[in-house]
Image (tube, rainbow, N blue to C red):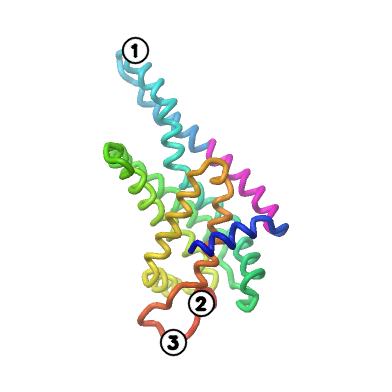
Amino acid sequence: MIRAFELAARQLGDPKLRGIIWWSLLLSLVLQVAIAALAWWGLKSLATFEMKWINDAIVWLSGAGVGVLAFLLFPASFGIVISIFLERIADIVEAEHYPALGPARGIPIWTGLWTGVVFLLAVLALNLVMLPFYLLALFVAGLGAVLFYAVNGWLAARVYYEQVALRRLDPAQVKAWRRANAGVLWLTGIAIVFLGTIPILNLVVPVLGVAAMVHVAQTLRPPAASRPFNPPTTTR
């Protein structure tokens, strides 16, 4: 997995990826601002009490709350970004490192976008549900962060791997391979989300994550019940 991220990071300087990275940066910034604005609106809308001092306190706390919620919900934007650029990123990475694979059949853009929207809604809903547990976990050193990365890493692993794998495998095969490699995919998802919470770096994580997942897909072990053959997207 570490090797996958190393290869992905090295290829970020590829001229073929440069334009995609800039568009990804722009879209990530727009989505981050939108998430912060929605968080601000949502928290401010709670200031409906009759006592002015309570409302003032809510508005004051909203400033800090916006930053926390934007941080927690920023991974939700990854699905939208990768749904737009995944096909081109994966093609470039495979052409550079795995030319023997040949062209992928790809997935329809609307299928990718729908998957991205579903991922966005799932991350938003799950993190809002988990927010009280995150807050409670703050009283135990490090537990809140572990919980956050574990939950969002699982979601990220699923959407990244499925969109990469569906370019070459049918849904039943993707499901079988994902289950057989749940641990390594989960760790990869956690790494993607962790990098996505680092300022500045988080703006290129959608591209970096797709490239890394393409490499990870080449190292996965086949499902136990599968025939002894080598699917092109999951083995070398």
The kind of secondary structure element at disc 1 is helix
Is 71 left, or right, of 97 in this rendering?
Answer: left
- Please name the amino acid that badge 2 sits on: Thr
Circle on res. 231:
none
- Measured in 3D between alpha carbons, the distance from the residue under mark 1 to the one under mark 3, in whole angstroms, is 70 Å
- Predominant SS along the magenta part: helix
Mark 3 falls on what kind of element? loop
Name the quadrant of the C terminus.
Answer: bottom right
Residue placed most toward the observer, 72 or 40: 72
- 40 drawn magenta: no
Q: Is residue 138 left or right of residue 39?
A: left
Residue 23 screen position, x and y as percent: 65, 48
Q: Position of residue 46 (x, y in %)?
A: 35, 26
Magenta-tinted stretch: 17-33
Q: Which mark is residue 235?
A: 2
> Which residue is disc 1 drawn over?
52
87, above or below 230, in the image: above
Q: How much space separates mark 2 and mark 1, taking CA atoms?
A: 63 Å
Name the N-terminal-most of marks 1 and 3: 1
Q: Residue furthest bottom?
A: 228
Separation of marks 3 and 2 at Cα, in angstroms: 12 Å
Residue beneath disc 3: 228
Residue drawn at the location 57% of the way across and 64% of the way down? 108
Crowd band around label 1 with a 10 angstrom C-alpha radius: few (<14), some (14–19), many (20+) = few
The image quarter in which residue 43 lies = top left
Left or right: 215 in relation to 92 = left
Percent coordinates x, y for residue 188 in the rendering: 45, 60
Label 3: how many residues lie within 10 Å, few (<14), some (14-19) or many (20+)? Answer: few
Q: Is residue 147 left or right of residue 104?
A: left
- Residue 198 position in % (x across, y down): 51, 43
* Residue type marked 1: Lys
Give the mark nearer the N terminus: 2 vs 1: 1
